[in-house]
Amino acid sequence: MSETKYLYMAQCVDSLRTLVKEKIRLLKKNKYLANADWIFIEKNFRIENPHTINMINNDNRDINLNDHNIQCSHCHRPISIEFNQIQYDDLFEETRIRIINIQKTSFWRQYRDYEISTQAVRILSSLCDFVIDRKVNPGGWVPSAAVRSVAKREYPRFLKRFTSYVIEQTRDKPIIF
């Protein structure tokens, strides 16, 4: 397993452990589960991390990209890892995809909380899929052709809605010059 994948797996296990702890904490508050044996449940749902990372600064969770200390799962000795350019590129690509997926999840949460419309979440989600599937320009921007095609479809609808909104808001108000 590459060092990048090893670090990624360690972070995934940590996230899973945090998620389980949070779910148990929420279930403890459930009145129907008040008599459950929570000590037994916590003991049996303990997740051991075979991909333990020894960070340089555990308090801030800072990662020095030149030097990673990882604990061996067999002998528990710290192993220092230095990344080469290919590993940096691999780490960058995985990080880019994870950030885009997090952004996409954020759009769906906003939709669930009625902050954005169905059409907006579809457009934003499809743009996220477009960016994930293709290599982005070195500057990190979506190609103008993709934005142009979405704008051609959506601009008339936006203009119509925005115009009706402005008319509705200014209907009974005088025009000030």
Image (cartoon, rainbow, N blue to C red):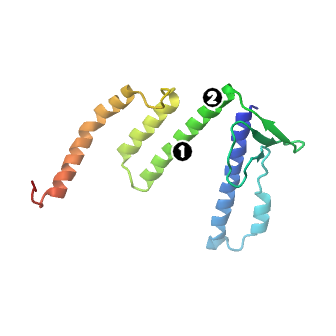
Indicate left or right for 118 with 90 as reference: left
Q: Splitting the image into 4 quarters, where does residue 37 fall?
A: bottom right
Position of 151 relative to 171 (above/below): above
In front: label 2 or label 1: 2
The residues bearing labels 2 and 1 have C-alpha atoms spaced at a distance of: 20 Å
Residue 152 location in percent, x, y? 29, 31
Q: Residue at x 48, y 34 (%)?
A: 129
The amino acid beneath tag 1 is Ile
| Mark seen at residue 102 | 1
Position of 70 relative to 174 (above/below): above
Indicate left or right for 126 with 174 as reference: right
| Mark seen at residue 34 | none
Q: Is mark 1 on a helix, strand or loop?
A: helix
**Which residue in the protein does label 2 denote?**
89
Q: Is mark 2 on a helix, strand or loop?
A: helix
The amino acid beneath tag 2 is Asp
Dot 1 crowding, Cα within 10 Å, few <14, some 14–19, many 20+: few
| Depth check, front residue: 8 or 70 | 70
